[in-house]
Amino acid sequence: MSVDLAFDDAQQAIADAIGQFCRDRCSDEVVKAQAGKFPSELWRDLAELGVLALVTPEGEGGALELVAALEALGHAVFPGPLPATFLATQLLPEPDRLAVARGEAVVSVGTPPLMPWAPVAHLFVALEAGRAWKAVPRGEVQPLETLGGEPWGRVELARELELADAGRGLALCDLARAAYLAAAGRRLIEAACEHARARRQFGRAIGEFQAVAHPLADCFIRLSAAATLARAAAFHFDRDHADASSIAAAARLSARRAALGAAYVGHQVFGALGITLEGPVFHVSRRIRQLASEPPDEGPARDEVLDRLGL
């Protein structure tokens, strides 16, 4: 039986609206300027669009709507703790959930002591072996510099409350990360292809050489497959498939591998221009590498199913 994974009119409208918002408010120059900082103004604007509340009772969206939004945000390399935010809106008690969905509170999700976005976070969720707890810092957060240009911190956390249904939140986090990474990787490969068409060596565009063209084509195929798997995982999630969380984890792993491969090949095509701060793609590859290094943590049940899937 075949499944139509094309977005319906409502889902496509979400992708189009967020894509237009990103073109208007989140240019490459804006993204580069946000390095090392939390994008407060952009974050509030995104919340006002209803994106952060998308998979809450107030937002009335499902996993496919989430994937539609994250494809648009990933292509724009939108900054901020997006996957962690969608996880938190599934797990936290209602007052905290509403604050996160409205953009009033920033959440840090991970396994202490190294926590993403900890220096700017108002709320903390600690993960371990597929379980999640609302937590509070013990002492001050020690800010850390990261190669990806995002504010992380070292902090000890005291667990306050175990959060129910962690599996659902982790699966949505996986879906968000998968859709974002696949879209960001495709953005990088599109830029690399354009550069390969324009850059000339030995009297020919470098894209005419097989050593350049074939890796770009391979990356495009892997990224397209990863994006399709993310949509398929969302389709199964919305229908409460028994293996939905494991398929979502597989989608994240597929997108992570494809996006990191795109970053590697993209840098090869651009050469030194690809690793300069002011260059055309470094902010994209840096975001890919940062997001690929973040939690979620892996539970033993999900590991078992991933082994069965051969991933």
Image: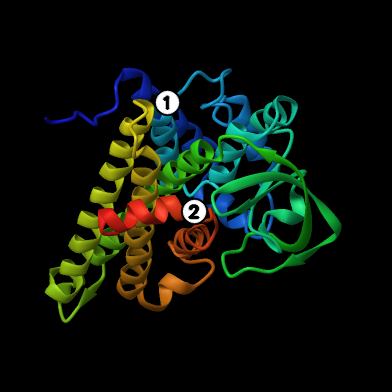
| Residue 25 pos. (x, y %) | 55, 38
* Residue topped by disc 1: 14
> Residue farthest to the right?
139
**Is 123 positioned to the left or the right of 87 in the image?**
right
In what quadrant of the picture does the C terminus appear? bottom left
In the image, residue 219 sits, relative to residue 274, either above or below, namely above
| Residue name at image x 41 percent, y 31 percent | 63
> Residue farthest to the bottom?
202
Does the image show residue 255?
Answer: no
| Residue 24 pos. (x, y %) | 51, 35
| Mark drawn on residue 292 | none
* Residue topped by disc 2: 299
Residue 308: image quadrant is bottom left
Check disc 2 and give the amino acid type. Gly
Looking at the image, which is closer to me, 128 or 4? 128
| Residue name at image x 30 percent, y 62 percent | 192
- The 10 Å Cα crowd at callout 1, few under 14, some 14 to 19, many 20 or more, is many
Cα–Cα gap, marks 1 and 2: 32 Å
Disc 1 or 2, which lies upstream in sequence? Answer: 1
Helix, strand or loop for disc 1? helix
Check disc 1 and give the amino acid type. Ile
**Is 110 positioned to the left or the right of 130 in the image?**
right
| Residue 223 pos. (x, y %) | 28, 53
Does the image show residue 297?
Answer: yes
Helix, strand or loop for disc 2? loop
Looking at the image, which is closer to me, 134 or 97? 134
| Residue name at image x 46 percent, y 41 percent | 171
In the image, residue 1 sits, relative to residue 145, either above or below, namely above
- The 10 Å Cα crowd at callout 2, few under 14, some 14 to 19, many 20 or more, is some
**Is 59 positioned to the left or the right of 120 in the image?**
left
| Residue 119 pos. (x, y %) | 76, 56
The reply to whether callout 1 and callout 2 are in contact (CB within 8 Å) is no
